[in-house]
Image: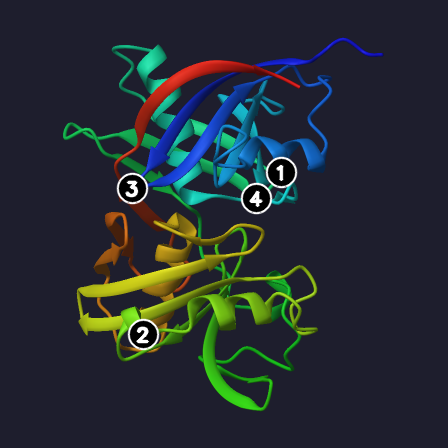
Amino acid sequence: MLPPMRLDFVKMHGLGNDFIVLELPSDATLPTPAQWRALSDRHAGIGFDQALVLQPARRPGTDVYYRVFNADGGEVEQCGNGARCVAALLQARAAGRAAPLTLDSPGGVLRAHALPDGRVSVDMGAPDFEPAALPFRAPARSASYPLQLDGESLEAGAVSIGNPHVVLRVAQVEAAPVERVGRALQSCARFPRQVNVGFMQILDREHIRLRVYERGVGETLACGTGACAAAVIGRDQGLLDADVEVHVPGGTLSVHWAGEGESVWLTGPAQRSFAGYVEI
C-alpha cells in the first residue's frame, strides 16, 4: 500500500466563492478526480468550489503557473475569483512589492495587482465572442443565440473569458431557473466542453444582479468570470456602460470593459480563511 499523500493548503474565498490553494512542484502527483471530489465534500472533506494548484512559472516574465480543478474533479481553463485569490496570496508574501503580478494558467496570462482598499484587480484579457472560442456550435457570431431546451426556447449571449459562458437575461434573479437550466445545458450538444450559465437582471446601465451555475460545481455565491461575461455581453448588446457593479449572492464585484478588443478588468475582495493540511 502506498503511503498517504500530505497536501498543505490555504483556504480562501472571493465573496463566498471558495477555494483551496496548494503549492506543488511541476512533477508532483496530483489528486485523482475522485480524490478532488472527496476533498470538495463540505461534510466529509474540506469543502470548496475549486482547487487551485500553484506550480513554478513555466515562461519568462511570469510569477506562477496555476491550474484549476472544479469540485467534480474536472480541470478547467480559468477562474476569475481564483486568480484574484492567487494574486492576494502571492502579494501578501511579497510585502512591499508595488509591481503587478503576472499569473499564467491554461486560460492564458493575466496581470493582477492589489488596491489600497484591500481589493484585488485582475486583467482577464480581451473577451472572445467567436463561437469557436468557447467552443459553441453556431454558424456565426451573433449578439444572442436561440437555444432549445426540452421544448423551451431561450435567448442567450455567449462569450469566452478564458472559459465558456452563456448569459440569459431574466426579470428577477430570485425566480430564475438556475439549477434546472444550468444543469440541463451541461448536456447540450452545442457545448462540447460544457458551459457556465449566467442569469442576469439589469437594474440600470451600471448595475446588474447575477446568479451563475458553474459547470462542474453548480450555483456558486460568486463567479468572477461569470461577472465579466455578463457585463461584456450586456455592453455588447448596448444595454450596459463600461463600468458595471455586479451584485452576486456573496456581495459585489466591479467589472470594467472599454469595448471590443480591450481587456476586461475584474475587481473585488480576496480573503484568506485558514491554513491546514490533509492526508489522502
Q: CA distance from mark 2 to mark 3?
A: 22 Å
Residue corresponding to mark 3? 15
Pick whichever of labels 3 and 4 is earlier in the sequence: 3
* Three-letter code for the amino acid on which mark 2 is drawn: Ala
Residue 157 versus residue 49: which sits nearer the camera? Answer: 49
> Residue 37 bears which disc, if any?
1
Residue 41 versus residue 232: which sits nearer the camera? Answer: 41
Rate crowding at label 1 as few (under 14), some (14 to 19) or many (20 or more) other CA atoms within 10 Å: some
* Three-letter code for the amino acid on which mark 1 is drawn: Arg
Q: CA distance from mark 3 to mark 4?
A: 22 Å
Pick whichever of labels 4 and 2 is earlier in the sequence: 4
**Helix, strand or loop at disc 2?**
helix
- Residue 32, compared with residue 72, is above or below; it is above
Which mark's residue is nearer the viewer, 3 or 1?
A: 1
Which mark's residue is nearer the viewer, 4 or 1?
A: 1
* Three-letter code for the amino acid on which mark 4 is drawn: Gly
